[in-house]
Amino acid sequence: MQNNFIGRNLFDLDDYTAEEILIILEATKAMKEINKRDYKKLPTLKGKTVCTLFFENSTRTLMSFELAVDRLSADLVRFSANVSSLAKGESLQDTVYTIDAMGIDLYIIRHSYPGSPQLVHKYTGKPVLNAGDGSHAHPTQALLDMFSIWERVGSLKGLKVTYVGDIAHSRVVRSNLIGMKKMGAEITVCGPKTLMPGHLEEVYGCKVEYDLKTALKDADVVMGLRMQLERQSEGLFPSLEEYSKLFTLSKETMKYAKKDAIVLHPGPMNRGVEILPEIADSDHSVILEQVTNGVAVRMALLFLMLGGKM
Amino acid sequence: MIIKNGLVFRKNRFKKMDVLIRNGKISKIAENIESAKENEIIDATGKYIFPGFVDLHSHLRDPGQTYKEDIVTGTRAAARGGYTTICAMPNTEPIVDNIATVEYIKRKANDLGYCKVQVIGALTKKSEGKEIAEIANMLEGGIVAVSDDGNCVQNTKIMLNAMKYVSSFNIPIIIHAEDYSLSGKGQINAGKMSTKLGLSGIPALAEEIVISRDIMLAENLKCHLHIAHISTARAVQMVREARTRGLNITAEVTPHHLLLTEEACVNYDTNTKVKPPLRTEKDRQACIEGLLDGTIDFIATDHAPHSDFEKEKEFSIAPFGINSLETSFASLYTGLVMNKIIDLHFLIQKLSTSPAQFLALNCGEVSKGKDGDLTIVDLDAEITFTPENMLSKANNTPYINKTLRGMIVKTICNGRVTWNSDSK
């Protein structure tokens, strides 16, 4: 198979075709098999050095990426902003120049400012994997979501998918909208008007609903999003209680979706706010599978982008 | 000095003429001026001769932020862009809210500058929007207008009092219209691109609500209100309606709001980060329409230089502003005149004649007795702006490394050559 992923960046999914996304999903499947083995390691990226640049707190995404790097036998160096030079006022440019001088083959970056991955690539010329940039994009999350659905349901084409919550601040949703649209899903987003960015229909070709029951009608896939308390102090909604009254995924509201609909959540969950335990822990839920699949997706991407050999 | 054989812009026509400048003033315009007394003859065969451009809105960063720009480099950049008069905005460090700083700028520009510099004083002390600045004092120092540009007076009562106070001095109040509670942490226009890029948006409403407020305040005061860098369709419409009612409301638009839209921000290019933000195509069209029908009086650059290290940052923390004096004419000529959206005559009026009239300056036309301010242009020549050849200290323009048409070959200010493209 011709690997045309080598040396490319993953800023977001808009640079990738539906065929390429399918290749990533297939590769993920292979990696998932390896992760089920007793000996969960491939020598394939031996000698490569991967750097995680995390300018924003993260535990699970960082762990997932680092595990993926380890399992492919690449060397890992970790930079996290809290403990290092950024606090001393060094610019991203200088930080990245300094690290790059140590000899890095690929960067994984998380940053609270949109567009930062593009800058890291500009400064280093190395492939960059976006692990979340502000409210802009989180393509590996979208891919693991897509994989989780694809694995359960098969084709993504024609699936009715509904995203519920704080759409405005969600990088997960933005990347999902791009990816799922490419794969032919029919998408609806739902949430309070104050947390809905403008022009969604135009930009992503999705439907926008403000009523949960309407939004969930006949859905095959439902994703709840983490509702952050800080939005309350920003005056965007009155209270978590009222939010949950209108938008929580519960047995009651999930009745409107298809009977065998699956439920996703990018985590960490606020149980009782955007999702009730009766759904999070039900047969609908693929939430823990998402986490399992996250490692496999990231292995697949590293493998493809660094040109690993099976 | 005689400038020979150029196509001179006069009475809204181009005609091959010679121009004689003596003692810094235009003293004769005729065919074939021969004079043995003149030791400086400039051959402008095949070139166009415009009245020197006048900019009502420049940030020279001097005093206080001279790592970005200073009066020498800013005026050199202006001269290269064909400007012979520019107005310095007061948001320096310290703010120009006192006569001493006004005099400093005027003296330095006079001694070392490459064009004439008029000074705009602050409306409120430190431009904090709290107490009225010493405007009468600054008028003695020679300010031509007042503005808190870069800042916007948020408190309506203070704005009302400031307008009342200024209305007795016969100078315009220039406003940068921005309601901070609406613009918030916004980075680009609130619209399609902000949704796509995940950047916070600055809604058109943030500008419009302040323009609407200030028009209402000005209405009962007979105060001359000038809207800086107008950028939205509804704002243009509000100014149009106010003028129909006979109010003394004027407006300017920048080259970038006439030429670019929010789409330019797609790659997080911080050179497109500006306030007000680049808006939608509909807004851009409305600005062009407003300029064409006279709702918008002239074009002003909002030249806002920032150092490379400041712009070479994540989009969210890079400063707002576009470096514009050098690229202004070429960008407008290439983007609007060559595309037949406006004609050359009209562009010259909006760059020279109208802003000169606005401040009642003795320039803006090529006619006898006016200041010897001329811009000589080769419309066919291409020009590529690069960090190496920019005369401004800063390179923060979306046109960096781009090639445009319409090169300023010489600029003459008060009869002195201030820019010559031949002598690098």
Image: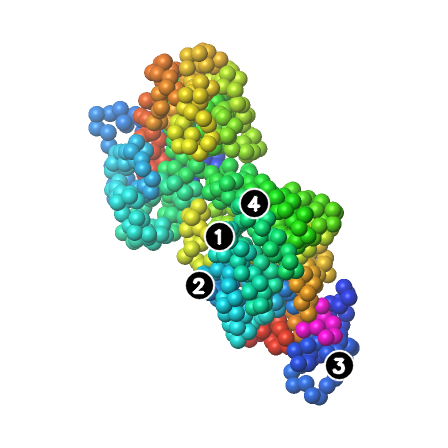
CA gap, disc 3 to disc 4? Answer: 58 Å
Q: Position of residue B162 (x, y in %)?
A: 58, 53
Where does the magenta region start and end? B365-371
Q: Name the residue under label 2.
A: B64
Binning the other alpha carbons within 10 Å of mark 2 as few (below 14), some (14 to 19) or many (20 upward) gives some
What amino acid is labelled 4 in the image? Answer: Thr
Q: Name the residue under label 3.
A: B33
Q: Is residue A15 left or right of residue A295?
A: right
B18 vs A39, nearest the viewer = B18
CA gap, disc 4 to disc 1? Answer: 13 Å
Q: Which of marks 4 and 1 is nearer the N terminus?
A: 1
CA gap, disc 3 to disc 1? Answer: 55 Å
What amino acid is labelled 2 in the image? Answer: Gly
Given contact means CB atoms under 8 Å apart, are the residues at marks 1 and 2 in contact?
no
Assign a secondary structure to mark 3: loop
Q: Is residue B392 visible?
A: no
